[in-house]
Image (cartoon, rainbow, N blue to C red):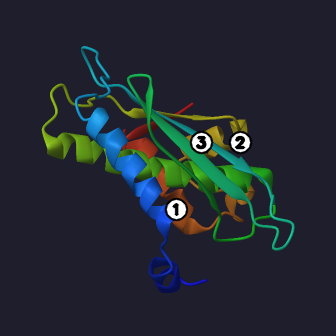
Amino acid sequence: MGEASYILGTGETHWSAVKIILKYLKRTKDMFLIYGSEELILEGYSDASFQSDDDDAKSQSSFVFKLNGGAVAWKSSKQATTVDFTVEAEYISASEVAKEAVWMKNYIQELGVVPSIVEPIVIFCDNNGVIAQAKELRSHHRSTHILRRYHRLREMVSRGDVRID
């Protein structure tokens, strides 16, 4: 069923759900989350599952970001390309997480939040091969199979935007 036909097919059940949501929002309008600290600490966690889709053998990337210990962003998505090695799937995931980390850091700085994020954002990765590849400034035979666009991770590490552990 398309979105338009779903919207046209709204019924009493939908209106009941909307009323419940509106009552909840009215009841909780004065509530908020506090991520307090003397400084802002943004941490990213990256992971990938190798060729987890049985139909097309594509891997799954996932991440979560924590700001002062509280989760603020997360995502899980199928990778756009099929890879041959676990390290490649993990590297792609880490590269995407690093891009998201830089965007989040820039966004926080543009908001003028004080204190702002000064240190490189730490991205935790559970694959030693990815950590070594990210810190290596030149390519060699072990990384020839990784698409070039994902080597932005190396640039972000060398600039000090992110640190991968």
Crowding near the residue tagged with mark 2, few <14, some 14–19, many ≥20 C-alpha atoms within 10 Å: some
Circle 2 sits in a helix, a strand or a loop, which is it? helix
**Residue 30 image-quadrant placement:** top left
Please state which of the two labelled residues, at mark 2 or mark 3, is closer to the viewer. Answer: 3
Mark with earlier residue (2, 3) = 3
Image x and y of residue 31, in percent: 28, 28
Image x and y of residue 57, in percent: 82, 68
The N terminus, quarter of image = bottom right
For residue 27, say whether it is visible.
yes
Mark 1 residue type: Thr
Crowding near the residue tagged with mark 3, few <14, some 14–19, many ≥20 C-alpha atoms within 10 Å: many
Distance from Cα at disc 1 to Cα at disc 3 = 39 Å
Image x and y of residue 162, in percent: 42, 39
The C terminus, quarter of image = top right
Q: Name the residue that disc number 2 marks.
A: 129
Distance from Cα at disc 1 to Cα at disc 2 = 51 Å
Give 130 or 7, whichever is nearer the viewer: 7
Q: Residue furthest right?
A: 54
Please state which of the two labelled residues, at mark 1 or mark 3, is closer to the viewer. Answer: 1
What mark, if any, has residue 13 been given in the picture? Answer: 1
Image x and y of residue 163, in percent: 47, 35
Q: Is residue 148 above or below residue 71?
A: below
Mark with earlier residue (1, 3) = 1
Crowding near the residue tagged with mark 1, few <14, some 14–19, many ≥20 C-alpha atoms within 10 Å: few
Mark 3 residue type: Ser
